[in-house]
Amino acid sequence: MVKKLDDKVALITGAGSGIGRASSVLLAREGARVGVVDNVIEGAEETVRLIKNTEGEAIAIKADVSVVADVENMINTVVDAYGRLDILFNNAGISAVNRAFTAELSVEDWDTVININLRGVFLGCKFAIPHLLKNGRGSIISTSSVNGLRAATTIAPYCASKAAVINLMRTVAAEYGQQGIRANAICPGVIETGMTTDFVPFFDFNFIGQGRAGQPEEIAQTVLFLASDDSSYLTGAAIPVDGGWSAEFKIPMNLPEGF
Ligand SMILES: NC(=O)c1ccc[n+]([C@@H]2O[C@H](COP(=O)([O-])OP(=O)(O)OC[C@H]3O[C@@H](n4cnc5c(N)ncnc54)[C@H](O)[C@@H]3O)[C@@H](O)[C@H]2O)c1
């Protein structure tokens, strides 16, 4: 049976949990050999175990995406193991160190979030692009957020980093489009992962068009679409996968009955 990613090699960061794990499993099921990267190696190893259970091919790699030497090493490890790189999914991210309004944010907390969420995406691109250029094609996908499209209080570095990721993807798309590289951002809404377990029970899902949270597997389907030739003319885009949340301004009025 022909699969969508036969002969392709993918590297996915933040792949020890949530969206990264679901995407690793799906891309492997579609034939990709996957470099499963996380700074928590036990999570990455568990993802590899899930992939190998279904006879997929993957290796676990420990890397902190904000550290130059780690990122260089994670790319080289995958290329050494599988001989090439076709798909980079920059997905590792954190929401906040401590939540605070902007004037109360510490500079250290700002730097930590920006370094993982934005510098990490830049570093992934910097070290992966030379390998994609060798193939004359490739797909880079980065996880932004609805908070890259809209603001939220108490998480300024998250909002700023996720907005910057969108324009970084557009820039890469413009720079390397004629050499066969596509670059896109995904903007998830509320997805049930390790990142959201704390606040999902308190969330009012009536504010979201579809009235529910998303599952990591529903983001993985968009990752697969962007990774495969099904999206061959799609680049420089920021795609909300958010149940319609970012499509709507809720009208802040209590209208009388029957209005
Ligand atoms: N869950 C949501 O509702 C939601 C919404 C919008 C965007 N996102 C984004 O999705 C991405 C994945 O998050 P998730 O929801 O799957 O959360 P998650 O916490 O389940 O997974 C994130 C993974 O990234 C890893 N990680 C964190 N810092 C790292 C670093 N410096 N280097 C390497 N790995 C690191 C963690 O160990 C973890 O395994 C993040 O970029 C997040 O900002 C999530």
Image (spheres, helix red, strand yellow):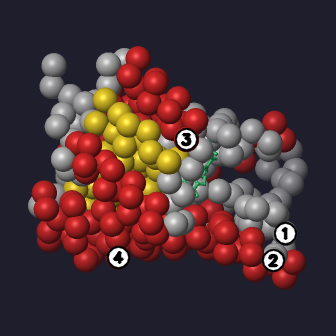
Whether residue 219 can be seen here: no
Who comes first in sequence, dot 4 or dot 1?
1
Task: Mark 4: give few (<14), some (14-19) or many (20+) Cα within 10 Å.
Answer: some
> Along the line of sight, which residue is nearer the eye, 161 or 125?
125
Foreground tag (1 vs 3)? 3
Q: How many numbered markers are drawn?
A: 4
Which image quadrant is residue 2 in? top left
> Along the line of sight, which residue is nearer the eye, 146 or 3?
3
Q: Residue at x 67, y 75 (%)?
A: 111
> Along the line of sight, which residue is nearer the eye, 52 or 218?
52
Foreground tag (1 vs 2)? 2
Residue topped by disc 4: 171
Whether residue 212 can be seen here: yes
Task: Determine whether label 4 and label 2 are within 8 Å by CB.
Answer: no
Amino acid type indicated by mark 3: Ile
Amino acid type indicated by mark 1: Ala
Foreground tag (3 vs 2)? 3
Residue topped by disc 3: 41
Amino acid type indicated by mark 4: Thr
The circle on residue 163 is none
Who comes first in sequence, dot 4 or dot 2?
2
Who comes first in sequence, dot 1 or dot 3?
3
Amino acid type indicated by mark 2: Ser
Ligand 1: does it lie within 8 Å of the C-beta at label 2?
Answer: no
Residue topped by disc 2: 106
Location of residue 206 in the rendering, given as x and y in whole percent from the top left corner? 74, 42
Foreground tag (4 vs 3)? 3
Vertical comparison of 11 with 125: above or below: above
Task: Determine whether label 1 and label 2 are within 8 Å by CB.
Answer: yes
